[in-house]
Amino acid sequence: MARTPSGLFPSGPPRRPVWREPHPVTGGGVAAGAALTAAWLLLFGLLGRDVPGYAWWTVIAGGLAWAAALVLARYGDRGVATGVAIVTAGGWSIAFAVVVTRWATSSDWPMW
């Protein structure tokens, strides 16, 4: 009577194939997505002539970047999507800090 091994100590190759994802997350992909998004947010931020303009352009650019990140996460490179999402969140945080600092110093909400 043959005894079935427990699997704790495998004795051979697995009985079924191992699935490998086509686009694994790599540091290079994350760095590329981060660098491109930083340039994207910088270019859009430079379109604003004042604090409200800078903030609105950053919100618009970030929304477009997140839409691209969602598409990349679903159909493309998840590492690049991760870099895009991280830098977009950072860019939005910087824009929020600028708006709040302006609001605190002038006692007037600068967005409208």
Image (spheres, rainbow, N blue to C red):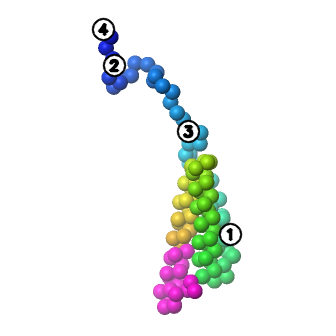
User: x and y percent of residue 107 in the render?
Assistant: 49, 91
Q: Earlier in the sequence, mark 1 or mark 2?
A: 2
In this picture, residue 34 sits left or right of residue 105:
right
Q: Disc 2 and disc 3: Cα gap in Å?
A: 29 Å
User: x and y percent of residue 15 in the render?
Assistant: 46, 22
| As drawn, 23 above or below 14 | below
The residue mark sitting in front, 3 or 1, is: 3
Q: Earlier in the sequence, mark 1 or mark 4?
A: 4
Q: Amino acid at mark 2?
A: Pro
Residue 21 disc label: 3
Query: Which image quarter: residue 67?
Result: bottom right
Depth check: give the residue in front, 34 or 11. 11
Magenta span contains residue 105: yes
Q: Amino acid at mark 3?
A: Glu
Q: Disc 3 and disc 1: Cα gap in Å?
A: 34 Å
Few, some or many C-alpha atoms within 10 Å of disc 4 (few <14, some 14-19, many ≥20)? few
User: Helix, strand or loop at disc 4?
Assistant: loop
For mark 4, what is the residue?
1
Chief secondary structure of the magenta portion: helix
For mark 2, what is the residue?
5
Q: Disc 1 and disc 4: Cα gap in Å?
A: 73 Å
Q: Amino acid at mark 1?
A: Leu
